[in-house]
Image (cartoon, rainbow, N blue to C red):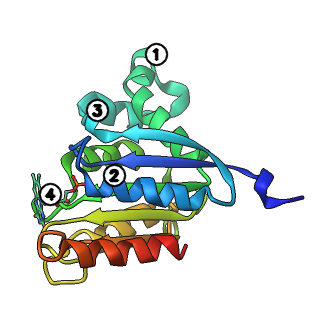
Amino acid sequence: MSNQNTVNTILRLDASMRKNGSYSRDLSDRLIDQLTRKNRANVIKRDLSDGIPFIDENWINANFTALDDRTDEQSEYLKTSDMLVEELKQADQIVIGLPVYNFGVPAAFKAWIDQVVRSKLTFKYSDTGPIGLLKDKPTYIVIASGGTQLGSELDFISDYLRHVLGFIGIKDITIIDSSGLGKDEAATLAEAHNLIDSL
Ligand SMILES: Cc1cc2nc3c(=O)[nH]c(=O)nc-3n(C[C@H](O)[C@H](O)[C@H](O)COP(=O)(O)O)c2cc1C
């Protein structure tokens, strides 16, 4: 059977608050074009600039209540989280477009992380330590920044991303480095394009 007939599911997360003129979105477009050159794909779009609720006390209490003991109200508190975790489970590949904001990840992306890192659902503790419960899948993170260079001493996000996604089982991570756009936009984009086109 030809690979042309394979239909993958790609989960696309956009964390830039800019819907227009966003480098991470433009590069994610290019990346998805590249990933779908050989295999068709359904793309689930999760645009974090549309808003992601923060977890709160009700959420935490509901999550710490065993599934069978949850009230209908508690199940309701976890509905957004359930949906976001389901999107992760459905995906064969993940594409994340992520700007650096104030030396960290955008607040909406952190809110998304808090919604999907769920005890007993996406990770659990064992005698030998934590175990990620999601199936590993190729995950591409396009990181755009103005001046904060990935790999520099001010890069606080690459290790964080690898750790927190690995914690829930997603370890096959490729970072598309488009940091330093404010210093040399042309060179940064050329390098990012080369990497994307080589995938
Ligand atoms: C609120 C805000 C905070 C930012 N903080 C940083 C930063 O700490 N370091 C940096 O290099 N660039 C910073 N930038 C620049 C963005 O990372 C850069 O413009 C990037 O291209 C944004 O991604 P986008 O083009 O996909 O919107 C910041 C931009 C904004 C809007």
Residue that label 1 marks: 72
Query: Marks 1 and 2, how far apart in space?
Result: 38 Å
Question: Is the CB–ligand 1 distance for label 2 below 8 Å?
Answer: yes
- Identify residue type, mark 2: Arg
Residue furthest front in the image: 186
**Residue depicted at x 79% and y 60%:** 3
Query: Marks 2 and 3, how far apart in space?
Result: 14 Å
- Identify residue type, mark 1: Asp
* First in sequence: mark 1 vs mark 3: 3
Ligand 1 shows up in the quarter that is bottom left
Kindly report which numbered mark, 1 or 3, lies closer to the viewer in this rendering. Answer: 3
Q: Is residue 166 visible?
A: yes
Q: Secondary structure at mark 4?
A: loop
Mark 4 neighbour density, 10 Å: few (under 14) some (14–19) many (20 or more):
some
Q: Secondary structure at mark 1?
A: helix
- Identify residue type, mark 4: Tyr
Q: Position of residue 170 (x, y in %)?
A: 50, 63
Residue furthest bottom in the image: 152
- Identify residue type, mark 3: Asp
Marks 1 and 3: CB-CB under 8 Å?
A: no
- For the residue pair 173 and 54, the one nearer the viewer reads as 173
* First in sequence: mark 2 vs mark 3: 2
- For the residue pair 106 and 115, the one nearer the viewer reads as 106
Kindly report which numbered mark, 2 or 3, lies closer to the viewer in this rendering. Answer: 2
Q: Position of residue 4 (x, y in %)?
A: 77, 56
Quick one: quadrant of the C terminus? bottom right
Query: Marks 2 and 4, how far apart in space?
Result: 15 Å
Residue that label 3 marks: 50
